[in-house]
Amino acid sequence: MTQEVDNKLVPVLTEAVGVVKMAVFKKLKEHFTQNYPDWEDAFANMMAGAIINDLFCTPNLDPQFVDFVRTNRPVIAQYVRSLATHEDFAPLLPHITDALRVSFMCDHNQGTDTSFILTRALQLGILMEERTIPLPRHFIDSVKILGDSLGLVSPPVLPCEETDEEPEKK
């Protein structure tokens, strides 16, 4: 993928990055349900969201969420670090790597330098440096497969072909 991304592709790629975030959210929620059954659902949702927001450096500025992050910063930081090594999250690393890189390229295309996010992910061991940067089509296809495997996206349903024949009567 070149540094310049076609402007028509940016929204599609951004949406695909969102699917990766949803996949990470789902895996975090499953992990929390199994390992912390006493956590309330709302707390687990906020924790998963805070971890993803921290990873992608996209803070939620809602005052309730800001307070939650301030109160739970050590746990959030611990989970962001564990994404690189924990067996529950390791299968997502290629997708996270691709999503972080594609997100950077979309930001760069729009004039924003978010290279610090890649540097941080590399330092945390999350970014798989040896992984080839995917072409847009390959990224979108891999995200569709990931989303479908986790029940996050549905394959498109093709409309029935119209025919001149009447339906067969029984």
Image (cartoon, rainbow, N blue to C red):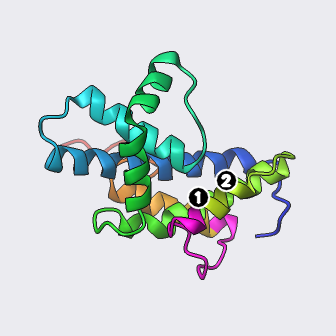
**Can you tell which quarter of the image residue 134 is in?**
bottom right
Q: Nearer the viewer, residue 146 or 42?
A: 42
Q: What element does badge 1 sit on? A: helix
Pointer 1 residue? 99
Q: Residue at x 15, y 49 (%)?
A: 34
Distance of mark 2 from mark 1, alpha carbons? 6 Å
What predominant SS class does the magenta segment belong to? loop
Residue 135, image x and y in percent?
69, 70
Pointer 2 residue? 103
Relative to residue 35, is residue 94 depicted above or below? below
Res. 105 visible in picture: yes
Which residue ends up furthest to the bottom in the rendered image? 130
Q: What element does badge 2 sit on? A: helix
Amino acid residing under circle 1: Ala
Within the magenta stretch, is there residue 124? yes
Q: Residue at x 66, y 63 (%)?
A: 119
- Residue 144 has which mark? none
Relative to residue 123, is residue 81 depicted above or below? above
Residue 20, image x and y in percent?
49, 53
Res. 23 visible in picture: no
Residue 58, image x and y in percent?
60, 39
Which residue ends up furthest to the top in the rendered image? 63
> Where's the N terminus, which quadrant?
bottom right
Q: Nearer the viewer, residue 141 or 21?
A: 21
For disc 1, the neighbor class at 10 Å (few under 14, some 14 to 19, many from 20) is: many
The segment highlighted magenta reads 121-137
Q: Residue at x 61, y 69 (%)?
A: 138
Residue 111, image x and y in percent?
87, 46
Amino acid residing under circle 2: Ser
> Where's the C terminus, which quadrant?
top left
Q: Residue at x 74, y 49 (%)?
A: 10
Tell whether label 1 touches label 2 (CB within 8 Å). yes
